[in-house]
């Protein structure tokens, strides 16, 4: 695999020397002890191959933006090295480098010029940039009149007008409308097929799991986890849910998959099973078959309010369906320690053939961000097969009834 980016033992510290004279002295190798030193990143190492897509996730302040600025050489690392092989295009901040007193077209000349392209190259690409942005006459209006979505359209269009070797996309895409986001991701996929490597920072687990081969979780300026996107996003979700006295553990299942469990464990799932309506447990389900999801929950402490939620996910970790007893208005109240609650959820398995998993959440409200008693990923794995229906394609079983008339 051709290496496009290599980050080795990178660290970044912001230092206060107390005076500009002392800071300037450090430029010439004079050893000066800083008055204050704050490390934002430490010991970061990873590499990216040609055509590989890496997702970078982490809570605010984890060091994601600083890392991207080191890779794009906007900042210089305090220690370690960043080796880049090829041309980078980056969208780190919305409209970064755009002047509000220039038109969209003028800003394209300016931004593409800073990227190293000649005026002739920019003029040749201008029709495609304007067409991709789809902002009409606003392209020749001042940027100060643009909405945030319009700025993102122009910024993305110019950044991807010339296929880069490495494309870096920060959260800027999140401000765009759904139509343009789909358009951007389509272009990104086309670039990947041609060999462009991708670094994407996003809180959107769907985007990370759909686009990326690998994901990196940053916490406190260090790499907490580097691995499969589904495993990393599970760890990230557990990290978000962490509160005082909350723990997170990762276990390897017999299937080889990594299961993430987090919470205070004041309530836990004791067992989870999938049954046919006739009562027997099943692992293989027919498309559309009526099933019962049976979950036993043990309270290990007195719990004022207990909510059970579950999420069905496909093999890529994408959500298929989820709900909880808060939304169904079946919250258990004043649950004493030592008691066991037995839940049965009945529903038709109207999903397409494939391998699926179920994650469970025990909380006090509609979200695990308040009281996370237990979050259990990969609590149950099952398979759906089409045994009795006409062939269809997709992740949902939505059988139609066709009516048609032959026109004269």
Image (tube, helix red, strand yellow):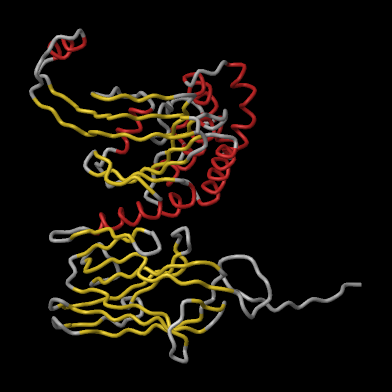
Q: Residue at x 48, y 31 (%)?
A: 166
Using residue 381 as the reference point, say whether residue 244 is left or right of it: left
Q: Residue at x 17, y 72 (%)?
A: 266
Pinpoint residue 294: horizontal percent, then vertical percent. 36, 82
Q: Quadrant of residue 193?
A: top right
Q: How many marks?
A: 0
Pinpoint residue 83: horizontal percent, then vertical percent. 39, 24
Q: Residue at x 60, y 35 (%)?
A: 194
Depicted 353 relative to depicted 134: above or below: below
Looking at the image, the residue that sits furthest to the top is 28
Using residue 160 as the reference point, say whether residue 97 is left or right of it: left
Depicted 74 relative to depicted 210: above or below: above
Using residue 362 as the reference point, say whether residue 293 is left or right of it: right
Residue sitting nearer the eye, 360 or 305:
360
**Quarter of the figure that contains the C terminus:** bottom right
Looking at the image, the residue that sits furthest to the front is 254
Residue sitting nearer the eye, 194 or 370:
194
Using residue 360 as the reference point, say whether residue 214 is left or right of it: right
Q: Quadrant of residue 43?
A: top left
């Amino acid at each position: 695999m051709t290496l496009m980016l290599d980050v080795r033992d990178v660290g970044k510290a912001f230092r206060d020397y107390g005076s500009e004279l002392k800071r300037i002295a450090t430029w010439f190798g004079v050893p000066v002890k800083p008055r204050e030193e704050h490390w934002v990143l430490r010991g970061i190492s990873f590499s990216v191959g040609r055509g590989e897509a890496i997702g970078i996730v982490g809570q605010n302040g984890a060091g994601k933006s600083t890392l991207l600025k080191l890779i794009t050489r906007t900042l210089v690392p305090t220690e370690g090295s960043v080796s880049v092989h090829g041309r980078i295009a980056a969208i780190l901040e919305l409209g970064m480098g755009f002047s509000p007193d220039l038109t969209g077209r003028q800003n394209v000349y300016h931004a593409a010029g800073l990227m190293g392209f000649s005026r002739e190259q920019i003029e040749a690409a201008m029709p495609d940039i304007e067409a991709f942005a789809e902002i009409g006459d606003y392209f020749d209006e001042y940027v100060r009149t643009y909405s945030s979505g319009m700025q993102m359209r122009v910024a993305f269009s110019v950044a991807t007008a010339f296929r880069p070797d490495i494309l870096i996309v920060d959260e800027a895409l999140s401000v765009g409308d759904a139509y343009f986001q789909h358009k951007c991701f389509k272009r990104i996929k086309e670039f990947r097929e041609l060999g462009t490597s991708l670094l994407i920072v996003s809180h959107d687990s769907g985007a990370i799991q759909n686009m990326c081969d690998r994901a990196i979780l940053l916490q406190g300026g260090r790499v907490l986890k580097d691995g499969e996107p589904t495993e990393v996003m599970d760890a990230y979700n557990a990290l978000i849910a962490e509160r005082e006295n909350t723990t997170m553990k990762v276990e390897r299942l017999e299937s080889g998959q990594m299961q993430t469990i987090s919470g205070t464990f004041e309530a836990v799932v004791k067992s989870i099973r999938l049954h046919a309506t006739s009562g027997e447990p099943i692992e293989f389900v027919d498309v559309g078959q009526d099933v019962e999801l049976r979950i036993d929950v043990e309270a290990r402490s007195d719990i004022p309010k207990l909510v059970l939620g579950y999420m069905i996910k496909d093999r890529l970790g994408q959500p298929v369906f989820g709900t909880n007893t808060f939304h169904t208005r079946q919250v258990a109240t004043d649950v004493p320690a030592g008691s066991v609650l037995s839940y049965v959820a009945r529903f038709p398995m109207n999903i397409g053939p494939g391998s699926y998993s179920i994650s469970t959440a025990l909380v006090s409200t509609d979200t695990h961000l308040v009281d996370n008693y237990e979050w259990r990923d990969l609590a149950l794995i099952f398979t759906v097969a089409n045994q009795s229906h006409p062939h269809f394609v997709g992740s949902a079983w939505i059988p139609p009834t066709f009516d048609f008339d032959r026109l004269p």
